[in-house]
Amino acid sequence: MKYRKLGNTDMDVSVLSYGASPLGSVFREVRIEDCIETVRTVLDGGINLLDVSPAYGETLAEKNLGISLKGIARDRYYLATKVGSYRPSADDYDYSAARTRQSVHDSLERLGTDYLDIVHCHDIEYADHNVIVEETLPALQALKEEGKLRYIGITGLPLKIFPSILDRVDKGVVSAILSFCRYELNDTALADMLPYLKEKEVGVINASPVGMGLLTERGAPDWHPASDEIKEGCRKAVEYCMERGESIAKLAVQFACAHPDIPTTLVGSANPENMRNNIAWVDEPINEELLAGVMEVLKPIHNNYFTRGRPEHCE
Ligand code: NAD
């Protein structure tokens, strides 16, 4: 496993990091034994950044991650969670100062720790950005001063949400951004924003290298927001790899982790075997011929993104 510095933080993060949303049964029902074994596999494989949110499985992912981390030394991993999105299916988003404070306290308890390395404002395309600047970020800064968290981040799908906040706050307030599905085989738009993010001294966390299931043989789950055109385009790429006896997930994970200016990429799975594979793949050389072939198949849908959130934040 290789490690890269995350922006201006003191964290050297593994190029592949672990997203714990599947521990909240968001892709399929999970057993606690699988969660415990997956988390052990991840840490033993050299991954040192774990990402979760109270929204994943309506707190189930945090609970299962907390149980899985019991007895493991706290200095073996960096832990990131989020505030603001709680129950997306019921439109429960709340970025107020009061709920932010409460949420961080609840997360600390569920995760069995007394500090968090990063707390992100989760999916701010659903937020009024005045509230983020005037309430959420100040509440998180106060919690930072109290020692409950070390760094603040923001996450979301449309890329324009990042400058919308970063252009309004001083450097150093937001130390990291988490972008998902915007640097993977079928969409590389995040790469164009890297010089801007560097200038803002922000560490970049990329997520969902297999497109939340789009670039897997199992395919995307029912709730996936991509259009049928994108799903169909990705399916063709999956089949292209299958016909050649190759794994598209392998290519997708290798591709995302290879960008030298993207410190880390979060991948999720509650299957220890998947995580063992993901960890092994990042150290293997990428099959350039297969990559060129897959890029050709994906050309008709390249950067053909899906969006969501309040109208003013959609792209
Ligand atoms: P992902 O692209 O990592 O896809 C996860 C799916 O791919 C799961 O179904 C998993 O079983 C499958 N998978 C993983 N490795 C595989 C392998 N080797 N072979 C076959 N299938 C494999 O998407 P994700 O889980 O949504 O994203 C990763 C993490 O990033 C999340 O868990 C979360 O922590 C974070 N994330 C955050 C946000 C946000 O903040 N808004 C959004 C998306 C993701």
Image (cartoon, rainbow, N blue to C red):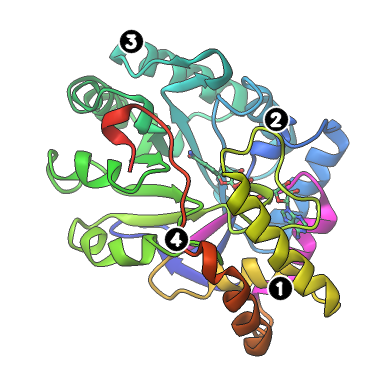
Q: Which mark is residue 303?
A: 4
Q: Earlier in the sequence, mark 1 or mark 4?
A: 1
In the figure, 20 relative to 244: above or below? above
Tell me the SS state at disc 4.
Answer: loop
Disc 1: which residue: 281
Q: Left of 44 or right of it: where is 205? A: left
Disc 4 residue type? Asn
Measured in 3D between alpha carbons, the distance from the residue under mark 2 to the one under mark 1, in whole angstroms, is 25 Å
* Camera-nearest label, 3 or 1: 1
In the figure, 243 relative to 28: above or below? below
Q: Residues within 10 Å of mark 2 (few under 14, many from 20)?
A: many
The quadrant holding residue 119 is top left
Asked whether mark 1 and ligand 1 are closer than 8 Å, the reply comes as yes
Disc 1 residue type? Trp
State the residue lying farthest toward the top: 98
Disc 2: which residue: 24
Q: Residues within 10 Å of mark 1 (few under 14, many from 20)?
A: some
Q: Which mark is residue 236?
A: none
The quadrant holding residue 224 is top right
Work out whether residue 249 can be spotted: no
Q: Earlier in the sequence, mark 3 or mark 1?
A: 3
Marks 4 and 2 in Cβ contact (< 8 Å)? no
Q: Residues in magenta?
A: 263-282
Work out whether residue 16 can be spotted: yes
